[in-house]
Image: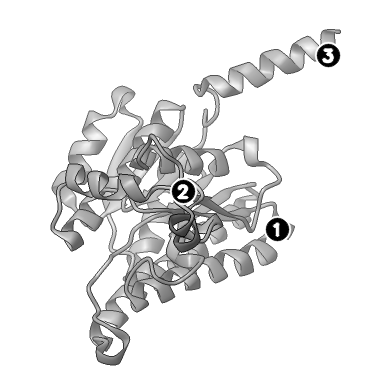
């Protein structure tokens, strides 16, 4: 009976949130806005020391300063420059002695045109940020974790576009498929060191990135998406994606690695055209 009670207490305490990231040091790239900002704030509220790595200096500094308790700071980091990623990781380790979590979230969504007229320069830019940037984050976070024997967690932001086509331009879709491949390969290699690698694939979220591409306000984007949601009565928010990231980064996911956690309310689980045809 005592064991059962102890388990229940520990389980409830972990669910409460405050202890889920206690003592952990996390880097969140693209953490100055959107999903990254939501993750940075949530991780800090759950006890982590958070380093926001971004190129949006004013926003990043403001987010870091607004996090209660001073457990968050901002560093400038362009993930397309591997040296800057390496420096951001080294700075976090030098200041805090370790790196437990890397959230590789920085990304771009550019209009690259239809396949027959694809802008290959824009394709290069998308791949450089979304895929090569993620590869640099995985590489240098893993190096830091392996060197110190840290059983760390790496979480990459992919997309429902990593699962199937039609959710974005071809270049964006290809970049997110590549991120998923990177995650699976890295999970296989790093498992022997106790390092877990996963990704989160959100559906459409009204973030500055997506709103910038569509020209819509967050409210307009959510209103447009709601009638098409399979899971009715709710729209996907950045905070929902951050919660999925928190799970994968925390010890609650201690045996989860190589996984693509899709956060889309069943959008990719069904054939939407069939649902419409039968009036669902």
Q: Position of residue 199 (x, y in %)?
A: 52, 55
Could you tell me which secondary element the residue under label 3 belongs to? helix
Q: Quadrant of residue 76?
A: bottom left
Could you tell me which secondary element the residue under label 1 belongs to? helix
- The residue wearing badge 2 is 280
Which of label 1 and label 2 is nearer to you?
A: 2
Would you call the spot at circle 3 few (<14 residues within 10 Å), some (14-19), or many (20 or more)? few
Choose the circle earlier in sequence order: 2 or 3. Answer: 3
- The residue wearing badge 1 is 191
Which of label 3 and label 1 is nearer to you?
A: 3
> Which residue appears at 32% of the width and 46% of the height?
227
Choose the circle earlier in sequence order: 3 or 1. Answer: 3
Residue 101 visible somewhere in the drawing: yes
Q: Distance of mark 2 from mark 3, alpha carbons?
A: 47 Å
Would you call the spot at circle 1 few (<14 residues within 10 Å), some (14-19), or many (20 or more)? some
Who is closer to the viewer here, 180 or 213? 213
Could you tell me which secondary element the residue under label 2 belongs to? loop
159 lies above or below 120 = above
Q: Quadrant of residue 182?
A: bottom right
């Amino acid at each position: 009976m005592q064991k059962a009670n102890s388990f229940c207490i520990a389980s409830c305490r972990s669910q409460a949130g405050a202890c889920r990231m206690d003592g952990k040091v996390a880097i969140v790239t693209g953490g100055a806005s959107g999903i990254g900002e939501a993750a940075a704030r949530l991780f800090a509220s759950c006890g982590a020391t958070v380093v926001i790595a971004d190129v949006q200096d004013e926003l990043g500094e403001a987010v870091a300063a607004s996090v209660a308790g001073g457990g968050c700071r901002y560093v400038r980091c362009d993930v397309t420059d591997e040296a800057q990623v390496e420096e951001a990781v080294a700075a976090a380790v030098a200041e805090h002695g370790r790196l437990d979590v890397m959230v590789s979230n920085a990304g771009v969504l550019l209009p690259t045109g239809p396949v027959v007229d694809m802008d290959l320069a824009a394709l290069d830019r998308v791949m450089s940020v979304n895929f090569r940037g993620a590869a640099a984050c995985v590489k240098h976070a893993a190096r830091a974790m392996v060197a110190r024997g840290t059983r760390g967690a790496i979480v990459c932001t992919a997309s429902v576009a990593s699962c199937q086509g039609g959710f974005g331009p071809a270049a964006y879709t290809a970049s997110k498929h590549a991120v998923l491949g990177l995650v699976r390969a890295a999970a296989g290699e790093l498992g022997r060191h106790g390092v877990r690698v996963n990704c989160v694939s959100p559906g459409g979220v009204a973030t500055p990135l997506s709103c910038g591409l569509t020209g819509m306000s967050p409210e307009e984007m959510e209103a447009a998406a709601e009638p098409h949601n399979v899971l009715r009565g709710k729209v996907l928010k950045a905070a929902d994606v951050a919660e999925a990231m928190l799970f994968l980064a925390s010890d609650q996911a201690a045996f989860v690695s190589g996984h693509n956690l899709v956060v889309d309310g069943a959008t990719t689980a069904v054939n939407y055209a069939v649902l419409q045809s039968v009036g669902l």
